């Protein structure tokens, strides 16, 4: 499984990849490597770990096959470029990498090493899986997304400097979660009872204004929609440090998806498995039960869209979801009533109601699993 | 008009008169076809004469357009044969149906058409001009003008000069109207080209109306064996043939005529015939045979068990000759030729099928950048250019499931198929003798022959395609070797040059095409 990786580890792994291939060539073989097949058919739910993982179907990538030669060459170009990034301790995005590798193969060849970024993305994943390394370990950044507020102190080594960041002193904007929270980033101090993940940025700002994190001694994080790799990694780290993770989203297809991605990981990133999933996470709301419990909410529901119903039905078929009768009830209620509700609706009565609602539910442990 | 009427008319008028009225029956229909027929008559005469005289023929055909509007052309044919003696010039060029055809029954090219005299007549009808002849025969060179008296079918010969000289051969010059030269598949050019293919021992030069000289060079130095005359077999005859033979016969009785003219007709067989045809008087002179009687006899022939005819009279082109001339003419990438064993049709007429299949190079027909497959039909070595759709050859070729032989689109492939049917009696469909009727045995035999060469083509196509793909794949991979080596070098800290060399070697070995080349060479050297 892909874990934390020290810089030297990455370089050693890349060196070994190269040496092994040269050996293969010397033996008269085509240079090749093996990667795990990243397909829906090779993705399964690990019941013990409670995360989505890749199965054991592997694929051989080889050079001396005309169908694979170009991709093989491109993969090696990525590997060699990443070795350079790590050695020079410079970071770039996958788009930056793409531009680094977008050059002609030679004067006589009317062919570029890469001609579209969509070519390079899956090859990066190939390398990640083959070497058991995250792309962040290759010094490849993804777009930052997600903000944090709470009593957490971080030391960030970046650009040759070390910076102390106190997440309780970031004002209205909070600390922006970087794409890589593993390399050059250390949590020095953490004073919180739990982590609250809030789907929407606006809602997070509302709770930040109320100093919800201080009053309730927690860390509040918004992924701003679907959680980025960095946010998910941070949640995993915080969970590893013993904090419960509670997730607060809309009661609709998109909200559920955000929750389950945080909890079990996603199909797309199944190759990162438990390193990016937080199976301990619990769903705090909004739920269909809330509509019964808080009368004013019943007037603030919205009619479901087709996608919500379709998604709800899909979720009912997933073993990792339909094992929980609470979720089965929740989803069936949505399908039956064809109503959904946004987290913003909780401000319908009073702006500060959200905070009360959350602390109440968390105190009474009114969660969906 | 019934056939009997037709024949009665044939008797009443002179043959020349008949011809004048029915020229389309004899190949003089359509302007292009008429010109091809004229050239055909001269060329076949030259080829037959050279064969008989054991000379390697050199033939030259020259066309001059005198007036486009009226289709007025001068045709000049020259050969290096033995020439014609003075007393026979009139008969050879000025008397219809006076050829050797009715005296001897050998496999001859001249089975079609009406001979050189027919051309003399055609010239006379269309331009009113006699045909000029120069004949060099055994030291005497005669120059003469030949024409025909239409009423009597007698030749008129005006001797212009008599000289002594070593030159031997024949030069004929004639002017005709109502013809047209073009380079279409039924034109003179194509006719001569195909004649050259079927007669690789001949050198044919063609000077077209634009003055362009086309030479179809001799590719084989062997004169084909002299065909031995054989008497016609009863099963190879049709009513018309029988009447022709009968009316020119000098025997006293039909009885004698039958047993002396045809092979395998013994006294016993005549007796059988008489029993089958009690209404026919076998004692009457053969020249009194009537159409209906002839037809009855032909039908009765089919009911009698005959000893099969001799195959001695059949002379195919020969596998090697076809090979050489197709290679020469088409410069193909692949060629396969097959000569089948003699077979019989209609219960007793022997025939031999030869098929050549050329692929690539100049094979096929090119029209405006597009290539399409081409079928060259021959009957006893004579190209069959007309009535292309109707005959057994085209029918057989089209009945082949070409996809089975990895020819995905036969119609649009660079393929030339040569089919030659040799027989003392080829079952032509019409009087024009340009298509061969679909006898089941002949069709089956042509199909077998084609399938035999098609199987070889399939091996070739597979080899070539695979070969090309392999080279293509190798190139596609080799272009990446430099980049891969440089990245592997950075990853492994091993010298890039060394890696590149090793990697190139590995790819070259993996995509080694030499073995395939060997295999392919074998296929090609086995071709034919």
Image (spheres, rainbow, N blue to C red):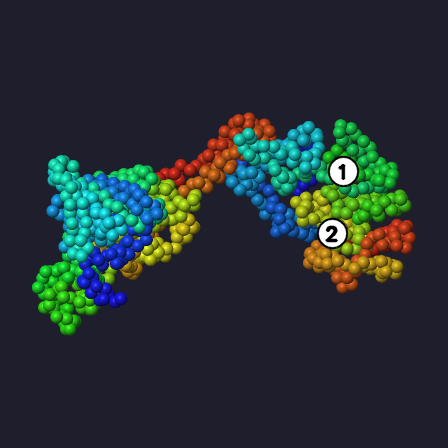
User: Which sits in the foreground, A226 or A47?
Assistant: A226
Looking at the rendered structure, the secondary structure element under dot 1 is loop
The mark nearer the N terminus, 2 or 1, is 1
Across and down, in percent, residue B347 comes to 22, 62
Image mark 1: chain: A
User: Which sits in the foreground, B212 or A103?
Assistant: B212
Residue located beneath label 1 in the image:
A178
- Would you call the spot at circle 1 few (<14 residues within 10 Å), some (14-19), or many (20 or more)? many
Image quarter of the C terminus of chain A:
bottom right
Looking at the rendered structure, the secondary structure element under dot 2 is helix
Across and down, in percent, residue B344 comes to 23, 58
Q: Residue furthest front?
A: B128
How many numbered discs, if any? 2
| x 74%, y 57%: residue | A308
User: Which sits in the foreground, B478 or A316?
Assistant: B478
- Residue B326 in sight here: no
What is the number of the mark on residue A255? none
Across and down, in percent, residue B288 comes to 14, 66
- Residue B24 in sight here: yes
What is the number of the mark on residue A257? 2
| x 15%, y 47%: residue | B157
Q: Residue furthest bottom?
A: B279
Horizontally, residue A355 falls left or right of residue B309, namely: right
State whether residue B517 is above or below residue B291: above
Horizontally, residue A255 falls left or right of residue B248, namely: right
Horizontally, residue A49 falls left or right of residue A56, namely: right
**Residue A118 occupies quadrant:** top right
| x 77%, y 31%: residue | A157
- Would you call the spot at circle 2 few (<14 residues within 10 Å), some (14-19), or many (20 or more)? some
Q: Residue furthest left?
A: B252
Image quarter of the N terminus of chain A:
top right
């Amino acid at each position: 499984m892909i874990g934390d990786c020290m810089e030297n580890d990455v370089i050693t792994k890349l060196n070994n990849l190269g040496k092994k291939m040269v050996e293969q060539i010397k033996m008269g073989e085509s240079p090749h490597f093996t990667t795990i097949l990243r397909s829906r058919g090779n993705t399964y739910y690990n019941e013990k770990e409670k995360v989505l993982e890749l199965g054991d179907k592997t694929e051989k990538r080889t050079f001396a096959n005309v169908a694979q030669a170009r991709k093989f060459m491109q993969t090696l170009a990525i590997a060699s470029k990443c070795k350079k990034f790590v050695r020079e301790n410079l970071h770039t995005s996958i788009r930056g990498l793409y531009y680094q590798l977008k050059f002609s193969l030679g004067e006589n060849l009317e062919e570029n090493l890469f001609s579209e970024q969509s070519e390079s993305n899956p090859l990066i994943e190939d390398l990640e899986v083959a070497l058991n390394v995250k792309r962040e370990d290759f010094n490849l950044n993804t777009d930052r997304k997600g903000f944090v507020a709470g009593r957490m102190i971080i030391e960030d080594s970046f650009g040759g400097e070390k910076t102390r960041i106190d997440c309780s002193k970031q004002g209205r904007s909070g600390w922006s979660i970087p794409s890589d929270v593993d390399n050059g980033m250390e949590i020095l101090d953490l004073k919180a009872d739990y982590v609250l993940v809030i789907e929407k940025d606006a809602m997070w700002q509302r709770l930040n204004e109320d100093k919800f994190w201080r009053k309730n001694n927690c860390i509040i994080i918004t992924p701003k929609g679907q959680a980025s790799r960095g946010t998910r990694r941070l949640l995993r780290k915080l969970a590893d440090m013993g904090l419960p993770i509670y997730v607060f989203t809309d009661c609709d297809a998109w909200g559920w998806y955000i929750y389950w991605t945080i909890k079990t990981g996603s199909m797309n990133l199944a190759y990162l498995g438990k390193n990016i999933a937080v199976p301990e996470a619990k769903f705090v709301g909004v739920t269909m039960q809330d509509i019964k419990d808080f009368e004013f909410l019943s007037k603030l529901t919205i009619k479901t869209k087709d996608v919500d119903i379709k998604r709800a039905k899909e979720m009912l078929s997933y073993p990792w979801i339909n094992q929980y009768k609470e979720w089965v009830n929740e989803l069936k209620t949505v399908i039956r009533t064809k109503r959904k509700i946004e987290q913003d609706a909780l401000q319908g009565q009073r702006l500060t109601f959200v905070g009360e609602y959350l602390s109440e539910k968390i105190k009474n442990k009114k969660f969906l699993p | 008009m019934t056939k009997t009427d037709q024949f009665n008319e044939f008797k009443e008028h002179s043959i020349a008169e008949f011809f004048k009225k029915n020229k389309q029956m004899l190949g003089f229909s359509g302007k292009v076809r008429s010109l091809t027929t004229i050239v055909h008559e001269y060329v076949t005469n030259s080829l037959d004469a050279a064969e008989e005289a054991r000379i390697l023929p050199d033939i030259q055909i020259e066309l001059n357009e005198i007036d486009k509007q009226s289709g007025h052309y001068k045709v000049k044919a020259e050969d290096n044969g033995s020439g014609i003696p003075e007393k026979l010039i009139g008969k050879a060029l000025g008397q219809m149906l006076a050829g050797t055809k009715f005296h001897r029954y050998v496999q001859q090219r001249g089975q079609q058409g009406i001979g050189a005299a027919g051309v003399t007549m055609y010239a006379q009808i269309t331009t009113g001009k006699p045909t000029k002849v120069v004949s060099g025969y055994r030291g005497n060179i005669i120059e003469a003008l030949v024409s025909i008296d239409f009423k009597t079918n007698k030749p008129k010969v005006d001797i212009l000069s008599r000289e002594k000289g070593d030159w031997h051969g024949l030069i004929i010059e004639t002017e005709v109207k109502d013809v047209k030269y073009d380079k279409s598949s039924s034109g003179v050019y194509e006719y001569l080209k195909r004649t050259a293919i079927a007669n690789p021992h001949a050198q044919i030069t063609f000077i077209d109306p634009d003055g362009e000289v086309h030479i179809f060079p001799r590719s084989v130095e062997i004169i084909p064996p002299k065909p031995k005359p054989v008497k016609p077999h009863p099963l190879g005859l049709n009513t018309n043939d029988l009447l022709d033979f009968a009316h020119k016969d000098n025997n006293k009785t039909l009885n004698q005529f039958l047993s002396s003219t045809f092979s395998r007709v013994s006294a016993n067989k005549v007796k059988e015939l008489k029993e089958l045809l009690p209404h026919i008087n076998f004692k009457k002179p053969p020249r009194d045979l009537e159409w209906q009687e002839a037809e009855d006899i032909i039908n009765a022939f089919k009911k009698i068990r005959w000893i099969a005819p001799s195959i001695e009279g059949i002379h195919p082109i020969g596998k090697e000759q076809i090979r050489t001339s197709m290679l020469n003419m088409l410069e193909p990438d692949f060629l396969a030729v097959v000569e089948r064993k003699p077979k019989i049709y209609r219960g007793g007429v022997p025939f031999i099928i030869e098929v050549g299949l050329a692929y690539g190079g100049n094979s096929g027909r090119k029209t405006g950048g597009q290539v399409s497959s081409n079928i060259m039909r021959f009957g006893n070595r004579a190209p069959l250019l007309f009535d292309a759709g109707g005959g057994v050859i085209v029918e057989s070729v089209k009945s082949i499931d070409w996809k089975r032989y990895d020819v995905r689109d036969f119609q649009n492939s660079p393929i030339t198929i040569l089919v030659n049917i040799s027989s003392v009696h080829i079952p032509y469909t019409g009087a024009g003798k340009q298509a061969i009727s679909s006898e089941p045995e002949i069709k089956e035999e042509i199909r077998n022959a084609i399938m035999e060469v098609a199987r070889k083509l399939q091996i070739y196509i597979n080899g070539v395609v695979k070969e090309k793909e392999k080279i293509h794949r190798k190139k596609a991979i080799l272009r990446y070797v430099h980049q891969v080596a440089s990245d592997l070098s950075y990853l492994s800290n091993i010298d890039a040059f060394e890696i590149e060399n090793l990697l190139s070697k590995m790819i070259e070995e993996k995509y080694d095409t030499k073995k395939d080349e060997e295999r392919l060479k074998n296929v090609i050297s086995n071709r034919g």
